Image (cartoon, rainbow, N blue to C red):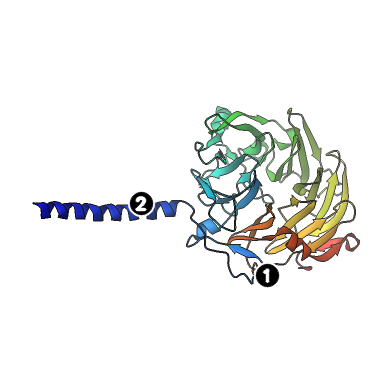
Amino acid sequence: MGLKRNNIFFIAWILLIIFTVIISMCCTKSGPFTPPPPDNKDDYWNHFLFKDNTFVNFITNATVVDDLLICTVDWGILMFDDLESGDAIRYKELPRVSVGYDNVPILSHEMIGYVAKNRNDLILFSNYQWYGGGADGIKWNQLGEEFIGWSFILDLPFQNTFGAINSQNRFVGMITNRDLVYWAEDVRNYAIYADTDINYMGTTIVTNVGYWDIPSMLGNRLSVLDIFAFKDKFYISYYRTNAPSIASYYAEISVDGTIREFRDPFVDRNMVIYKFFEYQGVLFAHTNNQIIKYTMDGENWTPLFVLTPAVNTFKEIDQYIFIHRADNIIVLEDLIDGVKGYRLPKENMAGVAIRSINKFRDDLVIATTHGMFYKSFEEVMNDKELVFTLERGILNLEGDF
């Protein structure tokens, strides 16, 4: 009898061990885990990779908030306290997240905005607090029954995302009925807005969903190029594709809903704004003929120099502008008072696709489709190579690099 009882205890113990191993394996697959030490110390860049998880190493966007490095991957967000040890990692899985080259999540100081997987009519928001609830979102039916079947405009070619979030957590994007109508004059496009917030439970909530009626967007098939939050305003760049000739526009929307529309804002009527960006509190734009311009009043633009070909990311870090194309990183300095352009070293980073550039603690961190590369910011900037001055007039990211 005692022997039989011992056998039962032994079998139960074995089953418990097997069950524990299975649970551990499942948990490991569903979340991040401690990475290996950085690659060869003789390489110029330290390389941060997760073991055996290619999808996590495909980083789509990154930012720094409250001394945390926040990265988006195929199942949610990773939050790093430290890159050297790899021990202080927090994460948050997000429901129905869709990320990749075409749907890049928006990262603000408190929120991530992302497109629901396999959906063009649902945008979701979640905060960075790992203990908070899931996500809340915007759907067409929150705008009214007349919007049934409409879809959000998600294919902004030079932004690779679908809207912007400002410092007050207001989101602005675009919605259209272009897939529901045949005649161009029946097309309706609206700029939509929503306020996002975090309640006392740490849960993200979306309120005050609405839209703005912008006359130049109605009765036209639009190509929306960029949506940008600048101070207390939003800027939307677009052009009409069914006009007798291409008509270029951008709209300025103030926090109180005041809208200014600008048609063919430049001497060259075919010039459109590909990308807005901010540098030292001034609004800049990169146009389709590659000219960098800036404005002090949102209306009158001053040309500076030619940057070719087009790029879709301009990041201000410590009074520099960082841009990238393929695996090349370029640093611009003194944009208004005699611009200079520098090339950064790319040893052991060649061939990867750069997704985001940030300064985290004392390091410059390059998020890529193959993990993260990082190195002392001071050391990297000491190693930069001057390749462009304003006297040259043209900075060619292909010919010069």
Residue at the front extreme? 2
- Callout 1, which amino acid? Glu
Separation of marks 1 and 2 at Cα, in angstroms: 41 Å
Whether 314 is drawn above or below 114: the answer is below
Q: Which residue is disc 1 drawn over?
A: 347
Residue at the left extreme? 1
Q: Quadrant of residue 49?
A: bottom right
From the image, which quarter does the C terminus lie in? bottom right
Residue 383 placed where, x, y %?
77, 66
Q: Is residue 339 left or right of residue 361?
A: right
Closer mark to the observer between disc 1 and disc 2: 2
Per the rendering, the mark at residue 121 is none
- Callout 2, which amino acid? Ile
Write the residue at 83% across / 65% down: 386
Mark 2, Cα crowd under 10 Å, few <14 / some 14-19 / many 20+, is: few
Q: In which quarter of the image is residue 254?
A: top right
Residue 46 placed where, x, y %?
63, 64
Q: Which residue is disc 2 drawn over?
A: 23
Write the residue at 34% across / 55% down: 21
Look at the numbered disc 1 and give the secondary structure of its residue: loop
Mark 1, Cα crowd under 10 Å, few <14 / some 14-19 / many 20+, is: few
